[in-house]
Image (cartoon, grey):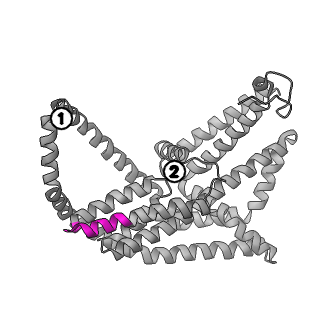
Amino acid sequence: MTVRQQAISWGVVFALFILILAGLREILFPFVAGFAIAYFLDPACDRLERAGLSRTWSTTLVTAAFFIIFVIILSFLVPLLYSQLVQFLENLPRYVSAIETKIAPLIEVARSYVAAGEGAEQARQFIESHFGDVAKFAIGFLAKFVSGLEVTFSLLSLFVITPIVAFYLLRDWDHIIAKIDGWLPRAHAGVIREQVKLVDETMAGFVRGQFSVCMLLGLFYGIGLSLVGLDFGLVVGLVTGLMSFVPYFGMLIGFVLGMGLAIAQFDSIVPILLVAGVFGIGQFIEGNFLTPKMVGDRVNLHAVWIIFALLAGGALFGLVGIMLAVPVAAVIGVLVRFTVEQYLASKMYLGTEESPSEAPEEEP
């Protein structure tokens, strides 16, 4: 089989894989979640195996411990978050009214300023003509998101199917890896293993590191906002930390929500500044200490690329796409870097038969 025929064959296989994902995305969540759990718990099972336990016992202990801790955390957080969410929805009309009252003078000043300038009427017409479209888009997106959560985040799949999938994948992990390795073309097995190792390092480094960053940020924002007296500060802080998995986006959403609540709740400027200060300190800690130490530059995943991957995955496959976004981004990143390296070492780039080490250096 020629190289071109091999490329076409792999392209067809990849296209079929994408079509299968698209067709089965409604039921894939428990399996993707189980695979993710098995992937991240495998190092713990390996350590227990080296300590003398069998793979089955190692898998049983690690899986049981993980889900017991998960259920305990949920049992503490869910009632608290639920009660605060109910209170927030009950107080939402009052918050909206308070915000409208407080910003009304600013709106009047801005309106008088804009009315005095040129192009005010055109700007008003543009906003009025497009506001409906924006609102429809936002409502439609929210409806699709909620609908997807109702389907994929069912208790049955989360608490029954996912642990089973995780257990069996984790128990047979080494056998699965060995089987896949046996299918690799022998002539290129070394190169493929090297690229897969880079993908593993990139994905594990980012996801594990970013997960730790999100947990610490959620605790910091939740405690900090609660201490300054912000209503529902714990919920706002935890949501901000959770959404910080998407670089910059989580902090922005949390800041807007926290400042809106602060403006509605407080009548003096000092508490509002304290809320802003909590977010400012959290962003400083994240940018200068947490992210460099726990994620670092070794993952080679740019923030813009991660944001695009998460949004694209969510748009194409919903919650399953969001879960698969970072692994796919890591694979694409490694493949692109490998392709660029091959290109820079090729005759197409050099224009001669010289190797990169023999090529003349360009003068600055």
Q: Which residues are magenta?
A: 265-277
Image quadrant where residue 276 sits: bottom left
Q: Mark number for residue 96?
A: none
Is 226 rendered above or below residue 322? Answer: below
Image quarter (top left, top right, bottom left or bottom right) of the N terminus: top right
Instruction: Tell me which secondary structure the magenta stretch mostly adopts.
Output: helix
User: Which residue type carries mark 1?
Assistant: Arg
* Residue labelled with disc 2: 322
**Quadrant of the snapshot with the C terminus:** top right
Badge 2 element: helix
Q: Quadrant of residue 9?
A: top right
Q: Residue at x 58, y 50 (%)?
A: 326
Residue 161 showing in the rendered view? no
Magenta stretch containing residue 105, yes or no?
no
Expressed as whole percent of the image width and height from the top left, the position of residue 67 reads 57, 73
The residue at 35%/74% (across/down) is 226
Q: Position of residue 164 (x, y in %)?
A: 62, 66
* Residue drawn at the location 81% of the way across and 55% of the way down: 178
